[in-house]
Amino acid sequence: MTQVAASAETRQLFIGNESVKPHSGSYYTSINPATEEPIAEIAAADVHDTDQAVKAAQAALGSKEWGRMDASDRGRIIWKIADLLEAHLEEMATLETIDNGKPIFESQYVDIPMCINVLRYFAGWADKVQGDTIPVRGPHFVYTRREPVGVIGAITPWNFPLILSMWKIAPALATGCTVVHKPAALTSLTALRFAELCAEAGLPAGVLNVVPGKGSVVGQALVEHPGVDKIAFTGSTEVGKGIMRDAADSLKRVSLELGGKSPNIIFADADLDAATRGVFNGIFSGKGEVCAAGSRLFVARAIHDQLMEGLIARAERAQPADPMHPKTRMGAIVSKQQQGTVLGYIDKGKADGARLAAGGLAVKVNDRGYFIQPTIFDDVRNDMTIAQEEIFGPVLSVIPFDDSDDVVAMANDTQYGLAAAVWTRDITRAHNVAAQIKAGTVWINMVNFYDAAAPFGGYKQSGFGRELGKKALEGYTENKTVWANLKG
Ligand code: NAD
C-alpha cells in the first residue's frame, strides 16, 4: 500500500452511504492487466475502517428505515437496484473488463446481466420467506420465524468480481440482513460503484458498506469482529480453511465457496461437436479463472484423437486479444503475479512428462499486458500436479480412459468437488454418472450454466453452504421457534 495524492480517479471507502477517506490515508493502485496502466487509486481500509463499517451495518440492522421496513418494500428496493444496474450496464461492464481483463463480450453479456437477474430473483423472495406452524403435543401454539442472521461480512475474489458479490448481497438484502463487503483488492471498482447505485435506489445508509483492502487486514478484521454474524466467503480453499478456524472463536456462521478441479467426462457415444465446444468453453471462457472450470478432461480413447483435433484447432483460433474489442474471447490474466503462477504450472506439467499439445506461452497484445495462450496438455495422469492442483488459468489437462467403469473413480479422485460435466447420448449412463460424481453441480451434455434459481456450491474441499436459489435463503436466516401456552 502506498501513500498517493488524491486524484480524479481516486475511489474512497463506502460506509453509511458516504464516500469515506481511509483512516490510515493509504491507497493502492488498481492496474488494467491488459495494458499494465493504472486505472484508479483505491482507498485501503484498515481495522479501524472495518470497525466503522460494521458499526454502520449494526445500526442499520436495528433501524426503523431497514430493520422494520416491510419485506415487500425491501423487495421493491432490490428491484430498483436491478433497474439502475441495467441502466448502467455498459459502464459497469467496462469497469469489470478494465479491472479484471476479461473480454467485454463476457462482462456485457454474462457478468452484469447475471447480476441483474440475481437481484430480480431475490427481490421476489423478500416477502416470501416464511416460517411454519407446528402441531406439537399439548395445548400449545408453536410457530417458527425466519429472522435475518444479522451483519454479513461478504468476502469475494477477483475472477467474477460483481457476480460473486451479488450472490451474497442479493439474498442478504432480501432477508433483511446488512452487509460489509470486502471485494478483492485487485478488482474493487464495480463493488464501489454498485454501492453508490444502491444508495441512489434508496437503500438506507449502512445497509451495504464496502471496505476494499488487503485480505489479511480487512478480511481478517471482519472474521474476528464480534459484530459480524456471518462470513460469506468465496475464494481459495487455503484462505477458506483459515477463515473457518478463526471464525470458530466467535462461532459466527460461515459459508465457503472454494476452489475446484472439475472433470469433464466424454464417453465415446457423445455428440462430438457439442462436446468439443463445451469442453473448450468450459475451460477457456473467463481465461480459466473460473472456480468451476472444466480443467480435467477425461476422454474415451476411441474418440481421443478426433476430440483433440477439434480442441487444438479452436485453441489456435482463440488467441488472446484486446479485452475491450467486442470480438475478443480470450482476455488478459488478472495480474502479473497470477500470470507467473499459471506459467509455473505449465512448466511443472512439462517437467512431469505431460505432452504440450497447444499454447503454453505468455504473450503480449500491442506490446503490453499479462496474457497466456489457451494451453492444452495431453497424456496427463490424474496424479500429476497439473491434474490435482487448481491452476486458475487457461490450462486444460487431458486424460484418456479405456474403461468406463473406472472413469468416475478417477474423476472423483481429487480433494475438490465443485462441479463436473458428463457427455454421452446414453441417458441411463448420464444420470448414473451424475449420481456417482461427488460434486455440488453436475451438467449433462452442457457445461458451466448458471441461473439465479439453481443452487451452487461445493462438496469436499470446495466448501459448504449453497448460493443462489431458494437454498441460499437458509444461509441468511436464523430459525426461531416460538411457543405460546393456549391452556385457559
Ligand atoms: P483468495 O482466497 O486469495 O482471496 C479471496 C478473498 O479473500 C479476497 O477478497 C482476499 O482479499 C480475501 N482474503 C485473503 N486472505 C484473507 C484472510 N486471511 N482473511 C480474510 N479474507 C482474506 O482467492 P482469490 O485468489 O481472490 O480467488 C481465487 C480463488 O477463489 C480460487 O481458488 C477459486 O477457485 C476461488 N473461487 C471459488 C468460487 C466458488 O464459487 N467456489 C468462485 C470463484 C472463485
Image (spheres, rainbow, N blue to C red):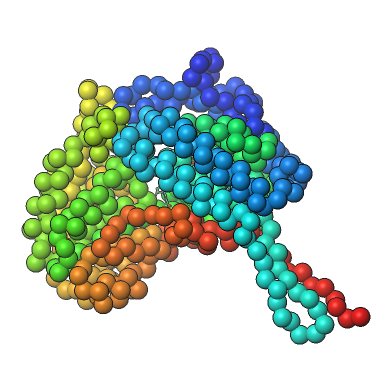
Q: Camera-side residue: 249 or 25?
A: 25
- List x then y, in percent, for residue 325: 27, 30
Residue at position x 46%, y 40% from top? 162
- List x then y, in percent, for residue 326: 27, 32
Ligand 1: quadrant of the figure: top left
Query: Farthest bottom residue?
Result: 137
Q: Camera-side residue: 83 or 26?
A: 83
Q: Camera-side residue: 347 or 324?
A: 324
- List x then y, in percent, for residue 332: 29, 34
- Label total for image: 0
Asked if one can make out residue 447 in the rendered structure from this viewpoint, the answer is yes
Residue at position x 46%, y 32% from top? 88
* Quadrant assignment for the C terminus: bottom right
| Position of 283 relative to 456 (above/below) | above
Residue at position x 70%, y 64% from top? 145
The reply, left or right, for residue 468 in relation to residue 378 is right
The reply, left or right, for residue 383 in relation to residue 37 is left
The reply, left or right, for residue 432 in relation to residue 95 is left
- List x then y, in percent, for residue 451: 41, 55
Q: Residue 222: which quarter of the image?
A: top right
Q: Residue 15: which quarter of the image?
A: top right
Asked if one can make out residue 154 in the rendered structure from this viewpoint, the answer is no
| Position of 435 relative to 381 (above/below) | below
Residue at position x 52%, y 36% from top? 84
The reply, left or right, for residue 193 in relation to residue 427 is right
